[in-house]
Image (tube, helix red, strand yellow):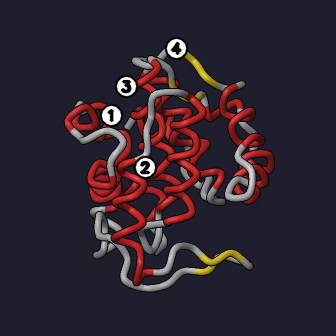
Amino acid sequence: MKDEELLSKKRAIELYDSGKISEFEVGTTNGLKQIHQYIFQDVFDFAGQIRNVDLIKGNFRFAPAMYLGDTLKTIDALPENTFEEIIKKYVEMNVAHPFREGNGRATRIWLDQILKKRLGQCVDWSIIEKEQYLSAMERSPINDLEIRTLLESALTSDIGSREVFMKGIQSSYEYEGMAEYDIHKLVEE
């Protein structure tokens, strides 16, 4: 959809500015569904709904739809007390890929919510280069050390910063090849 980037970025801004993000569950599939539904409500008729089709990206097959419900329950039960545990949970959710589209963008917000709640930190996504991030995520199901190291080097304690959140949204879309609309200009509108 042509307006996917514009409409969902506007919803991401609204999600933060309205304070709605603080009402969502943290670290659960349900919380991720809430984020996905909110951001993509104007874009996908399946916003916030767990997929019922199998997905393959390149040579990687995400969790089969047939087992997705059980997989998500297992992920929900994973501990999230340390940075290492939180990144493991993030990697597992990426492998599950619960939605047909929009997984990365929603899951990066979800990760930051867990990090804020558990560690009082979040990722400053604007300092992580796209190629480094995508490469580390591609290898993360086998070994999460690279993505862990990359994300740890970008942690900030500035968890209440609107600017950090907005730069994070902009970077998140750039990781997905969407950079037509600058979020900072949308914020000004």
Q: Which mark is residue 117?
A: 3
Is residue 82 left or right of 65 when viewed as pictured?
right
What's the CA distance linking mark 2 and mark 1? 11 Å
Q: Amino acid at mark 1?
A: Tyr
Q: Nearer the viewer, residue 65 or 133?
A: 65
Secondary structure found at label 3: helix
Q: Position of residue 119 (x, y in %)?
A: 46, 20
What's the CA distance linking mark 4 and mark 1? 17 Å
Q: Position of residue 169 (x, y in %)?
A: 51, 41
Q: Amino acid at mark 2?
A: Lys
Q: Position of residue 45 (x, y in %)?
A: 28, 75
First in sequence: mark 4 or mark 1?
1
Dots 2 and 3: beta carbons under 8 Å?
no
Label 3 Cα neighbours within 10 Å, binned few <14 / some 14-19 / many ≥20: some
Q: Amino acid at mark 4?
A: Ser
What's the CA distance linking mark 3 and mark 4? 12 Å
Q: Which residue is mark 4?
A: 157
Q: Nearer the viewer, residue 49 or 3?
A: 49
First in sequence: mark 3 or mark 1?
1
Is residue 128 left or right of 88 when viewed as pictured?
right
Q: Which mark is residue 9?
A: 2
Q: Is 173 above or below relative to 127? A: below
Secondary structure found at label 2: helix
Residue drawn at (62%, 78%) of the image: 61
Q: Which residue is mark 1?
A: 16
Q: Quadrant of the C terminus?
A: top left
